[in-house]
Each structure stands twice: as C-alpha cells, then as structure tokens.
Amino acid sequence: MTSDFIVVANRLPVDRVLNGDKVEWNPSPGGLVTALKPVLHEREGAWVGWPGCTDEVAVDDMPSAEQAGVRMLPVNLDAQDHELFYEGFSNATLWPLYHDLIVSPKFDKGYWERYQEVNKRFADAAAREAAEGATVWVQDYQLHLVPGQLRQQRPDLSIGFFLHIPFPAPELFRQLPWRREILEGTLGADVVGFHTADGAINFLDTLQALGEDVSYAHAEDEHTFVRGARLPQPGDIVGVVQVQDSDGSTREVKVGVFPISIDARHVNQTAMSPEVMARAEKLRTQLGNPKLLLAGVDRMDYTKGITHRLETLETLLDSGDLKAQDVVMVQVATPSRERLEDYQRVREEVERIVSRINGNYGSLGRPVVHYTHAGLPFEDITALYSAADILLVTALKDGMNLVAKEYVACHSDGSGALVLSEFTGAATQLTQAYLCNPHDPDSTAMAVVKAATDDPNSRRQRMLDMWDHVRTHDVNRWAESFLRQLQKVDNA
Ligand code: ADQ
C-alpha cells in the first residue's frame, strides 16, 4: 500500500496507555491532525512518526486507519535514540539555539550523529510509503534533514517543510557547527514555511550570508514585512532560493509565512457548551469568587516566561497595585522534557516563587497562586480560559503560542483580556492584545494593570477584534495555504 499524501512528524497523533497489561492507543487530536484530516482522508494519507515509547512497535500494533482516522506508520526510537536525538540534539541543541539562547545550547557530536541517523529512519519510512509523485509534508525542528534525505531517494515527490518554532537571527544560527547540513537538509523541500516574517527572513538572510542564491520577494523593499508596513498574510512567499541538486539540476525553493492557528470553531463550541460553562462557574466559586482571576497555561518550559509572570504578580502585590484579597492566579504547567536539567531548574524556580508569594500574601485555605504541574483534559483548560479575567502569555520567545488563540476563542462574547508577549508569533496577529515585553518587569506589570482597569468597552472591542481574526484565520486556512503553495510547485 502506498499513499498520495504523507505527514512526517516527530510524534504520531496518538498516546499509548497501559490498561493493566493491555496496550491501548488514545487519539491525541491536536490542531495539526484536525486540520489535516480532510486532506489525509481525501488523498488516502498516512502519518509517519514516533509512537511515543521506546518499545518496538509494529505497523500492525497500531490502531487501524478506520479507528484512528489516519493510517499510522511507526518509526521506532530506542532509549538511546530518545536521549541523543530527541532530548539531545532536538531539545538541548536546536531548541535553545532557536529560542535565542535563553539557556546555552549543547553542541555535541554524539547528539548530531544520532540526529542524522534517526532523521534517515523517518525519511526511509516516508520514501517506502509514498506513491509516485506524492506530497510529503515534514514537520518541525526534529526533522530538518528529512526533506534532503527524502529528495535523494525520491526526486518525484513534492516536499514541504514547516518549522513550528522561531528561526533565529543569522549570527545565532551560524554558531551551530552543523549549520550547512541543517540548511541543506531543509532545502530538500519545495516550500519551507515559518510562522512569522521574522523567521522566514532570518532563514533567507542566513542562507545569503553563507553564499546561497537568494532572491527576496519584495526586492525593492525586502523588509516590508518586518517593518510592519503590512501584516504577513497566510501564504505570503517572502523569498526564493535557487538550489542545485546532487544530479546537477537546479530547483527553486519557496520560503513563506504561514502562521499556524487552532480549530477555532471547535474550541469556541467547547467553551460555549453548557458543561464547560458550568465548570467555569464552579471553578470561580471554588477559587473564592475573586474580583480578578488571572491564569497561565503552558508546557513547563523556560521559553514560556512563567517565572517572569509570577514575579510580575509579586511586584504588583508588593506595590499595592493588586490587593491579595482581590486576586487569584491559576498556573497550570504540563510536565515537559523532565530529564533535562534546564527543565528541572525552571520547575524548581517556578515552585519557589509560587510558595514565596503564597507565604507572603496567602492565608490558610486561601492561597493567591493555585499551581499544578500537570496536563489537564481540554475541557478543564477551556473552563479555566472561560473563567479567567486575564490570561498571561509572557513567553520570552515562542514560535506562535496557541494558548493565546485558544483563550481568545473562549471569549467570543468580548469578555476577558489577553496580556501577550511581543516575542510570540501570536503578537504579529493578535495586535489588539495588551502587549508586553516580559524582559521588562515594568512593561508586564503595566500591561496587567491596563488590562484590569481599561475602559470596559475598549477592552471588549479588543477581544472582539481578536476573535474576528482567530475565527477567520483558523488551522484549516493555515494548512490550505501551505498545501496550495506546494500544489503550485506540483503544477509548475
Ligand atoms: P508549544 O510550545 O507546545 O508548541 P503552544 O503553541 O502554546 O506551545 O501549544 C500548547 C498546547 O498545549 C495548547 O494547545 C494548550 O492547550 C496545550 N496545553 C498547554 N498546557 C496544558 C496543560 N497544562 N494541560 C493540557 N494542555 C495544555 C510549539 C511551539 C509554539 C507553536 C506550536 C504550534 O513552541 O510556538 O505555537 O508548536 O506550531
């Protein structure tokens, strides 16, 4: 069996759960799989990815296409692959490098060697599965080499690559000892997509700095997008790179802006369901019906600025701008990459600040910050979004930040307020948020105070404008705009 459309991503869209001795697979319906379901369905699509465990999993062990809604092809990783490829090169080298060195990236040859090997495994799986002339869409920083490895074996394919995290400035990226290989691997694609114009231009500028043949789409004013003369629209091509393949033929690679989004209608409908509305009301009651309910929802990651946000709350309590009896904050942080030291450190720091705030400002039975280090069911997350007066997104750097968009989709009635870091991709689209610079405690504090005290009509209008944007720029539009560009290559 072969497929006309293949998604290659680090993870398959399922979670493995043990029910006694029995292995079960639960679908984990993220935005990506929701958006791609129609295309996967229509084109007999398949999904190549890691099943999330270090035991060997065979194709027949996976749920069937009928059960899961997509045909799933597992790529197995053993414990060492997980340590060197996933925790190592992906999350201890590329992740910190691409997030502007918030922590230092580790440059380790052992990591790099395993990254190449594992990428090849993904590429081989896709090459085996792809029908003649199929479209293959490779996702994210764990798989930079797959487009190149795939093209070598299968020049007949249309290949797309999308980066879900920021692409750093050229002088940062150029620190990477294996920068050429990463770029060459990526340029195996026909279309390379980023969330923001900054990411796309950083990528093009890096290639130009390393001597590649780059032409910018707006040659007369190549930084039109960056200067904010207009917002990038989904599907905008920012530049084109001429590459020469190993057989001597030349090829154009299009580099564009494709800001990802959420399944806005689904999130909105979930929030508006009577069960979730009741849950939101109950949550506020359980929290003591505070005058002001603040919330933060993140993976526990040093890029998300959780400590910065808690320190802002503390400053506002210290200054008396917020009164402890009026305010409650809920911080939900999903465990993430827990074996890495930098992740352990940020967790300890978050927990230290939470207890300091509660020690100084809480009373027995009435903490100011309610914190949990856990992933919650989506209904609980939406109930929290709905209940919260202000959501704080204070990421130091974030490719997009879907949490911000999910919050907006839960406030289609114009209630609530969003404090949003200007260093998120979301800030290029949700320009009506109360924007802040999380590196500047005064800026974040001012944004929170402004969100809390703003004229209610103006606050409402901001939220309605943002909902209008999220509603009309959902994840389907994102996927369609990317695939349309790939299609154009097909037809060229
Ligand atoms: P992430 O860094 O994981 O994604 P984000 O875009 O905010 O960040 O998505 C997080 C998702 O996890 C959201 O759907 C949210 O609802 C969910 N989530 C967060 N905390 C949770 C909790 N405690 N319990 C349950 N669910 C929780 C990466 C990039 C982003 C980019 C996305 C998509 O880092 O910049 O927006 O990919 O491209």
Image (spheres, rainbow, N blue to C red):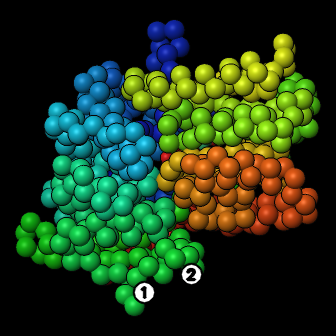
Tell me which corner region of the image, top left, top right, bottom left or bottom right, holds residue 188: bottom left
Residue under the point 84% across and 49% down: 452
Establish if 53 lies above or below 173: above
Q: Assign a secondary structure to mark 2.
A: loop
Q: What element carries label 1?
A: helix
Drawn side of residue 61 relative to residue 376, left or right:
left
What is the spatial separation of the Cα atoms under label 2 and label 1, in whole angstroms? 10 Å
Residue 64, x across and y down, in percent: 45, 36
For mark 2, does the 10 Å Cα neighbourhood hold few (<14), some (14 to 19), or many (20 or more) residues?
Answer: few
Number of numbered markers: 2
Q: Is 24 left, or right, of 422 in this rendering? A: left
Q: Which residue is drawn at 29% across and 27% down?
A: 83
Kind of residue at badge 1: Asp
Please give the name of the residue rendered at 68% of the width and 20% of the height, measured from the top-left corner: 355
Asked if one can make out residue 201 in the rendered structure from this viewpoint, the answer is yes
Q: Nearer the viewer, residue 9 or 216?
A: 216
Looking at the image, which residue is at 72% across and 37% down?
315
Q: Which amino acid does label 2 sit on?
A: Ala
**Quarter of the picture for ligand 1?**
top right
Task: Point out residue 439 in the picture as x, y percentages from the top left corner.
Answer: 56, 48
Name the foreground residue: 373 vs 269: 373
Q: Do the residues labelled 2 and 1 touch (CB within 8 Å)?
A: yes
Above or below, 202 against 75 in this view is below
Residue 127, x across and y down, in percent: 23, 51
Residue picked out by circle 2: 229
Label 1 crowd (10 A; few <14 / some 14-19 / many >=20): few
Compared to residue 279, the image places residue 477 above or below, namely below
Of residues 305 and 68, the one drawn nearer to the viewer in this rendering: 305
The C terminus appears in which quarter of the rendering?
bottom left
Q: Nearer the viewer, residue 412 or 205?
A: 205
Position of residue 76 relative to residue 230, above or below, is above
Q: Residue 221 carries which label?
A: 1
